[in-house]
Amino acid sequence: MINYKFERKDNVNDAFSSLYQIVSFLRDPENGCPWDKEQTPKDIIRSMQGEIYEYIDALLEGKKDHVKEELGDIFLNLFLLAKIHDQEGDFSTTSVLNDTCEKYIRRHPHVFSDVTLKTAGDVIENWQKIKKEKEGRKDDLNDFFSNIPINMPEIEKCYKISKKAAKVGFEWSNLDGVYDKLNEEINESKNTKNKDEDLEELGDILFTAVNLCRYKKINPADALSYSNRKFMIRFNKVFKLAQEAGKKLEELTFEEWDYYWSQAKKQIH
């Protein structure tokens, strides 16, 4: 048992200190939590991904108390991650924070020195210049896409791949060209002969659809998130309509599915 009594703090520095202290107690080799002591960085990043998605849900719902809770869970996971690396002797949490402070001051000379940058575009251009010239973060000369994270979710990776290619001129001349390509890929998917060809052609459809989003300046993840939510809301309405009619979803005929779906679309825009 650890003798500890928490008291709410009045400033962010003390509050962060309290959270890190609690995390340290959880990871204490003798009296800590058995579950927390077993966690590795790979375990924590999986947990943190889930917390980030829950934070996004809360943010889109607009419920500030829920947003506050999920943001706290993200901080907890971050501190656990830092504590594990500290205990493993990889690096100290203090050095992480010091390095980050120095990096962001270095990358914002227009804020912390006399450099003048007028637009967000100028800031991004100078940011990349600093990464290459002052920090030595040069791209792999044999891989045009070397700066795109390998483990990024595929739809986001696809968006970044196509965006980077478009920046150097690999782009359709107009929107009709994108639609023509999408129709071409759809038609090719109709003539596949095996699973390998299905994999290839369906991947081409998705890749082109992501490009269409990019061309229209829409993040594909945002578009898919919107469609997911819309589908779930409408499907839940179908579920409710079927219940009111005394029917189970698995017993509906094709015609009934079509009818209830049409009703759901009319009632929920």
Image (cartoon, helix red, strand yellow):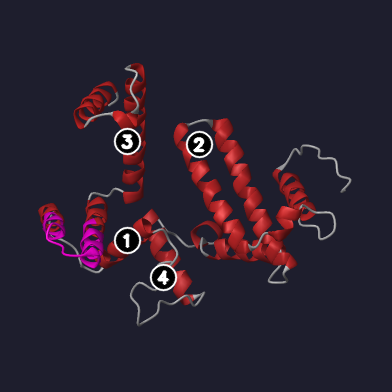
Q: Quadrant of residue 127?
A: bottom left
Q: Which residue is mark 3?
A: 231
In the image: residue 55, left or right of residue 193: right
The mark nearer the N terminus, 4 or 1, is 4
Quick check: 259 above or below 111?
above
Overall secondary structure of the magenta section: helix
Quick check: 54 above or below 116?
above
The mark nearer the N terminus, 3 or 4, is 4
Callout 2: helix, strand or loop? helix
Callout 3: helix, strand or loop? helix
Q: Which residue is mark 1?
A: 158
The mark nearer the N terminus, 3 or 1, is 1
The mark nearer the N terminus, 3 or 2, is 2
Query: Nearest the camera: 55 or 246?
Result: 246
Residue at (57, 52) in percent of width and height: 48
The mark nearer the N terminus, 1 or 2, is 2
* Residue type, numbered disc 3: Phe
Q: Which mark is residue 58?
A: 2
Q: Start and end of the magenta stretch? A: 183-205
* Residue type, numbered disc 1: Cys
Callout 1: helix, strand or loop? helix
* Residue type, numbered disc 4: Asn
